[in-house]
Image (cartoon, rainbow, N blue to C red):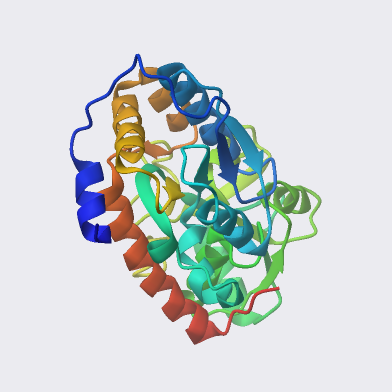
């Protein structure tokens, strides 16, 4: 079956048989990043919810390496029996360009299941930073090229590219300092080792509300309902938009019946008020709209980020 036909079939309403046990009693959900990142909480919530619906115990495993490429490749090479799934950020669209040596193509090698949620990023500084507004930061960076540093969760991470796009469109030069995950990057901000960072709102919004960091802007084209007083970066940097998103994939040869069942169970979670509320705490917007929007988003972002990577000369570690 052609890929387009398979995606269309998966998008159709599934006939669910709750009485049938999931064929693997302890399936794994691979997060291809270090533990403690923003993907962990929603992945564990989804694992818990799917386990309740499918009568299996979904185990979340962190398998970092190569900007998410190693864990994603592991899922692509796994047996297509329902025992291994992938939970990943929009970094999956960066892997084909930045980790070309892996010879891994998510469009070719994985079956899309669903977008899970859209997750804005925020540009943050420490609370005692001299920059109280985005305009002040931009003015200082233009006056002193390469003086200021920004942290991310690693080379090729979604937040790294969010920062690179910000610098490119704003016409400023920032020095990127990668960390092994956003948690140590935020620690560096608190310690005053780094001037600013881009981080998922799932990670940094609570820190801002607690007064641990100051948010100067957010990565969606418009202000977030949860933070109406924080400007969108696009208000100062026209054309800027760097939305992150979380999604789930399966090995490409997963039988259609199993894939359709997963798609159907994920779609049913759109009505789960608990899940929606737990994601909304971090300003994440629940999607769970099936494989077609995910396939389109992935294809668009591969092209977008390849252009930026090649233009500014980003290289893998």
In the image, is 275 to the left or to the right of 71?
left
Picture coordinates of residue 32 (x, y %)?
A: 61, 51
Q: Residue at x 30, y 36 (%)?
A: 257
The spot of residue 181 in percent (x, y) is 69, 52
Judged left or right of residue 146, residue 234 is left
User: Which residue is found at the position 66% from the left and 44% from the top?
Assistant: 62
Q: Quadrant of the C terminus?
A: bottom right
Residue at 68 percent of width and 80 percent of height = 146
Is 144 in front, or is 313? 313
User: Residue 55: x, y in percent?
Assistant: 46, 17
* Residue 132 appears anywhere in the view: no
Q: Position of residue 221 (x, y in %)?
A: 34, 57
Quarter residue 129 falls in: bottom right
Q: Nearer the viewer, residue 261 or 80?
A: 80
- Image quarter of residue 296: bottom left
Pick the residue in front: 85 or 115: 85
Query: Up-down: is 72 above or below 149?
Result: above
């Amino acid at each position: 079956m052609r890929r387009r036909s398979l995606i269309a079939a998966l998008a159709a309403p599934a006939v669910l048989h709750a009485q049938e046990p999931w064929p693997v009693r302890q399936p794994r959900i691979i997060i291809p990043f270090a533990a403690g990142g923003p993907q962990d909480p929603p992945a564990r919530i989804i694992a818990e919810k799917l386990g309740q619906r499918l009568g299996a115990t979904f185990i979340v495993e962190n398998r970092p390496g190569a900007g998410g490429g190693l864990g994603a490749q592991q899922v692509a090479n796994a047996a297509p029996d329902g025992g291994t799934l992938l939970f990943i950020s929009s970094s999956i669209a960066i892997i084909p360009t930045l980790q070309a040596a892996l010879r891994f193509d998510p469009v070719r090698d994985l079956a899309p299941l669903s977008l899970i949620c859209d997750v804005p990023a925020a540009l943050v500084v420490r609370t005692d930073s001299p920059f109280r507004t985005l305009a002040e930061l931009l003015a200082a960076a233009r006056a002193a090229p390469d003086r200021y540093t920004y942290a991310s969760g690693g080379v090729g991470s979604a937040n790294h590219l969010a920062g690179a796009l910000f610098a490119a469109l704003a016409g400023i030069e920032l020095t990127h300092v990668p960390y092994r995950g956003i948690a140590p990057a935020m620690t560096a901000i608190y310690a005053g080792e780094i001037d600013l960072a881009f981080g998922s709102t799932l990670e940094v919004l609570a820190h801002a509300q607690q007064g641990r960091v100051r948010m100067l802007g957010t990565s969606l084209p418009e202000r977030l309902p949860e933070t109406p007083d924080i400007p969108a970066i696009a208000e100062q940097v026209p054309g800027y938009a760097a939305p992150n998103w979380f999604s789930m994939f399966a090995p490409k040869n997963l039988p259609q019946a199993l894939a359709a069942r997963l798609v159907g169970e994920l779609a049913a979670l759109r009505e789960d008020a608990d899940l929606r509320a737990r994601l909304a705490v971090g300003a994440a917007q629940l999607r769970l709209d099936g494989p077609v929007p995910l396939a389109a988003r992935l294809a668009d972002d591969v092209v977008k980020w390849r252009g930026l990577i090649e233009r500014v000369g980003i290289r893998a570690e």
